[in-house]
């Protein structure tokens, strides 16, 4: 019987710990097959440096509380393994650590880059003779993994952005007569516009609201954008622009990259929201406000999507069940069975088909003018933001858990990564 | 029997409509004393332009739904009446509109400037012989009205900022090993640091978190700030800075006012968050992320404080009850009876003691180093963020109401404000 290694990678989300909960609770149910679950402190780095956390020291209640706790309970990392041929020493070290702690299962919880790391670890059996079963657990707010219908983490950001866009649009509508007429909200999405698209869900047939979306997939056209905002403000008196951080101009340059300098000539890093707000002010003379959701959007467990939490837990659980069956180099993927009522199941994706591929918004999810979402996109997004899954509260604040994170005693010499 | 006029003023909040709900539901219970409630479209402007909304056309269910709907259902305005002596024509117009629609009660829902407008209207009886009872309903996220222990609208922003700071701090803690070490969150509060203080509530004895607060009441000292951040990052590995938009340097200049120029030399309006983030980067070389909550914070009815909703409703209700008793020129104020368990009641404040006064953070609510909140501040804030009061949801989104807002037929000639 082998132990398991589990780690979190890349930008964390409101529900990545729900996947951790699914992994650990399921492993605990299969004590005949899996020994301890060791978590990597700060992702794969924990495996390389032998900084392992003994999750068996955590109570059942603490592990259960991971389901409603945002962020990465064991620490995450932005660190991509090179190929086995390029950096063999790292893989030898991984094997050394796995051997020392009798690790036979490897679960890596992350996005596209992490899937690539997991794929490389899954090749240790074949290429270096160390028997390991590596399963990737999908996670990314960017929703850009292929094969899976959606990525755990995205539904909750989508819900947060849809709710926030609705609320802020009600706000600007109230102020428009004598004050702000345009509200600009910057959201995440460097390459794919999935999160920005979610802003469009604030409006519906029953709730007609003027929302303009700027996608990274559509080159920014200043004149067209100003004409759109102008038309909306003329019709409604106000509007909201939901802007993806990754919006680029026709030359492919990020709009946020405006070469800002302060009064002393120092370079300043701004967001794209103030850039768009200035364009509105200069082009139309309208009063504006702008916001940048940044970490708030992906950490907002308080308004997580119930569907998303269920997906996150289920993929963690399925990863363990697949590993027990000996399925190496795979990822549990979410398969949509029907839109309405929403039904889904878990299927199995080969990791080689997942790693290093990005899924962008299909063009037919974006309206012809490039500023909105189509009915097809709404059908896709609607179930992902469905349901609320509130954390418990104490003294007015969510009771998020912090684990003890007891270190496993090191057995090996230091290793510099 | 006279009709009533009700209007919303200044920046809207997550719970100003709960006050509207309190006013209208209570007036409906006193049909023997108050006729119809006419709402001003866009605040006092609606009274001047005779743009009145007949709230009697709204169903009981629609009015009840105001309790869980953010923003200003009738539209708000930023418009301050001048003194009666300076601008007599405006007051004559108000009297003309009130006479035409048989209005004997005036309810104005706003902050300090609005209290001043309400005070002036309350003087119409005395100075111009028109019998009116004017009652102010307190509202402001800035929490800066005197006499009342707190202002409806503030508790919900405070809860939003406390929850968001907690969530974002968990996020940056997860990322700190290889990526972001400092998260900067800009919050509202041009003059008073009440909202920034709420960020400090994310940490507690049981939840030790490194949070630095920058208050507008404390002159920004770059060297001290960098030393504080450096110490926190050395101890915890990361930290969160909650920054009031109104932070000023020792010369009283807003930190957000950096004279930013784009590559073409155009002036750009930035927030204070990117300024602080740049200071951290240049001074300590640490990787950062920054967010600006802007309208999201004050519109966030989805995470409103139950205490705040109760206060907002109760002040609206009390305003009508005071008016029926003929109490002119007053404001229902919240009186704290005990901290723990939190008990409160409504008392009556004279409007002349409320208008045009600002309540700042007491110095003993801020720690000696100027970067945190004291136990005294915690005792004050704790009950204000207590309890959740979730709106109903449909299809993954809150079911916020939009009223029919049926116009009352005009009887008078146009009036240019």
Image (cartoon, coloured by chain):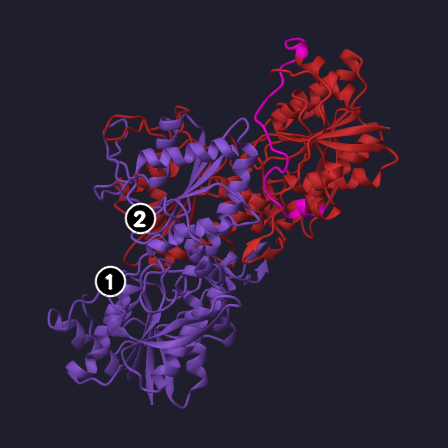
Chain colours: A purple, B red
Q: Which quarter of the picture shows residue B311? A: top right
Q: Residue at x 35, y 32 (%)?
A: A279
Q: Find the magenta span and give its range.
A: B64-89
* Residue A255 in view (yes/no): yes
Which of the pair A31/B228 is nearer the observer? Answer: A31
Chain identifier of the residue bearing label 2 in the image: A
Judging by the rendered image, the residue that carries numbered circle 1 is A79
Identify whether B249 is placed above or below B162: above
Same chain for the residues under marks 1 and 2 in the image: yes
Q: Is residue B125 part of the magenta span, yes or no?
A: no
Disc 1 element: loop
The quadrant of the image that shows the N terminus of chain A is: bottom left
The quadrant of the image that shows the C terminus of chain A is: bottom left
Q: Residue at x 78, y 19 (%)?
A: B99
Residue B350 left/right relative to A402:
right
Q: Residue at x 24, y 62 (%)?
A: A79
* Residue A181 in view (yes/no): no
Identify whether B43 is placed above or below A131: above
The majority secondary structure of the magenta stretch comes to loop
- Which callout, 1 or 2, points at the residue further toward the start of the chain? 1
Q: Position of residue B22 (x, y in %)?
A: 73, 41
Residue A57 left/right relative to B41:
left
Residue A254 left/right relative to A24:
left
Identify whether B274 is placed above or below A116: above
Q: Position of residue B302 (x, y in %)?
A: 57, 51
Q: Residue furthest left?
A: A85
Identify whether A243 is placed above or below A341: above
Q: Which quarter of the picture shows residue A92? A: bottom left
Judging by the rendered image, the residue that carries numbered circle 2 is A216
């Amino acid at each position: 019987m082998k132990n398991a290694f589990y780690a979190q990678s890349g930008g964390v989300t409101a529900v990545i710990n729900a996947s951790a909960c699914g992994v650990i609770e399921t492993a605990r149910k299969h004590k005949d097959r899996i020994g301890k679950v060791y978590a990597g402190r700060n992702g794969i780095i924990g495996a390389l440096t032998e900084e392992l956390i003994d999750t068996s020291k955590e109570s059942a209640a603490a592990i259960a509380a991971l389901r409603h706790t945002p962020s990465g309970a064991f620490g995450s990392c932005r660190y991509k393994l090179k190929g086995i041929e390029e950096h063999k020493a790292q893989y030898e070290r991984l094997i050394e650590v796995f051997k020392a702690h009798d690790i036979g299962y490897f679960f890596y919880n992350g996005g596209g880059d992490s899937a690539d790391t997991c794929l490389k670890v899954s090749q240790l059996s074949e290429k270096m003779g160390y028997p390991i079963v590596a399963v990737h657990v999908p996670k990314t707010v960017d929703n850009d993994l292929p094969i899976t219908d959606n990525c755990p983490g995205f539904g909750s950001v989508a819900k947060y952005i849809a709710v926030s866009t609705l609320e802020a649009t009600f706000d600007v509508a109230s102020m428009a007569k004598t004050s702000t007429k345009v509200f600009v909200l910057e959201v995440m999405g460097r390459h794919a516009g999935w999160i920005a698209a979610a802003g469009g869900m604030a409006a519906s047939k029953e709730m007609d609201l003027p929302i303009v979306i700027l996608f990274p997939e559509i080159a920014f056209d200043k004149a067209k954008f100003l004409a759109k905002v102008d038309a909306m403000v003329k019709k409604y008196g106000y509007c909201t622009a939901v802007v993806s951080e990754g919006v680029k101009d026709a030359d492919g340059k990020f709009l946020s990259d405006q070469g800002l300098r302060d009064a002393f000539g120092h370079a300043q890093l701004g967001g794209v929201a103030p850039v768009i707000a200035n364009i509105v002010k200069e082009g139309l003379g309208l009063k504006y406000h702008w916001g940048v959701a940044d970490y708030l959007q992906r950490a907002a467990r308080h308004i997580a999507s119930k569907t998303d939490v269920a997906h996150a837990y289920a993929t963690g659980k399925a990863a363990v069940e697949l590993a027990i069956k000996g399925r190496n180099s795979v990822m549990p993927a979410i398969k949509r069975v029907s839109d309405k009522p929403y039904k889904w199941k878990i299927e199995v994706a080969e990791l080689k088909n997942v790693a290093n591929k990005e899924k962008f918004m299909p063009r037919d999810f974006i309206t012809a003018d490039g500023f909105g979402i189509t009915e097809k996109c709404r059908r896709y997004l609607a179930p992902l933001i469905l349901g609320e899954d509130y954390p418990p509260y104490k003294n007015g604040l969510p009771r998020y858990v912090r684990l003890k994170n007891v270190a496993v005693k090191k057995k090996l010499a230091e290793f510099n990564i």
